[in-house]
Image: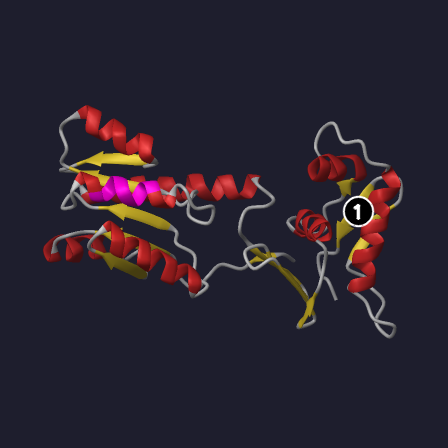
Amino acid sequence: MMDVLKRPSKVALVLVDSDLREAEIKKLLLEDFPKVRVARTAEEGIWMARRILAGGEKIDLLLFDSSLENSEVLAFLAFVRGRGNLSRVPALVMTKERDPEERVRMLEYGADEVLVLPCPDRETQARIRALLRRELSSEQDNPDAPARYQVGHLIVDTERHEVRWKGQRIAVTPLEFRILVRLVRRPGRVLGREELMKSLWGEHWEVEDHNLSVHIHGLRKKLSRKDDPCTVIETVRGVGYRVREEAS
């Protein structure tokens, strides 16, 4: 049975310029984000974001507090929206700004939502959770979105671009990796050859059908040994391929 492995805890990166507001926000986020990292300026936030990612963690939420200058918010948004590994992280701006033009600028720079204060804590929490649900749905619809899948002894990590089989790291080509990701997302489900080819090469692909068979063969070979033939990828004759629900 598939297990989409999640990190031990979600990480929120908060930009706030007030000790009092920092305590209030940490209390607000505690239930959903056991890990809250705090920065005081855009420059510090950029440094902290790089450090978090370098440590192998994923940032799940960016929150900008009303105590910040608008210029700091915009500077950090401009940075993260220009980075592939940060561009999709949900970003919530909490503000007391009454000028609608300034709020529009924040949205244009990449904020997913601008929440005008005062706002009840329960509503703020509900809006944060809604952002997280939206991002989760987006990831599930995107086979190349960052995720780590485990099916039995097979582990496929799209962030590290890594495949492990029975504890051993397996070297695969970029195309082999993409094939494996699409199969491992739904173990036991048969993925038709045509559907798989369109997903890999596009709607108007001009690739011989045999080409896919060659790559599948290559994957099977890499996921097997002489004394341990591959039973991970199965062919459903006349239909397509699937990854066994219990890869062993």
* Residue 197 position in % (x across, y down): 76, 38
Magenta span: chief secondary structure = helix
Please give the name of the residue rendered at 55% of the width and 46% of the height, measured from the top-left corner: 145
* Residue 191 position in % (x across, y down): 75, 42
Give the side of residue 212 with respect to residue 136, left or right: right
Residue behind mark 1: 241
Residue 239 visible at all? yes
Q: Residue 152 versus residue 214: which sits nearer the camera?
A: 214
* Residue 144 position in % (x across, y down): 59, 46
Q: What element carries label 1?
A: strand
The image quadrant where one finds the N terminus is bottom right
The image quadrant where one finds the C terminus is bottom right
Q: Residue 126 versus residue 118: which sits nearer the camera?
A: 118
Q: Residue 52 versus residue 63: which sits nearer the camera?
A: 52
Please give the name of the residue rendered at 24% of the width and 42% of the height, measured from the top-left corner: 73
The correct choice, above or below, for 104 with respect to 37 in the image is: above
Q: Which amino acid does label 1 sit on?
A: Tyr
Q: Give the range drawn in magenta.
A: 72-78
Q: Does the magenta stretch include residue 75?
A: yes
Colour scheme in use: secondary structure
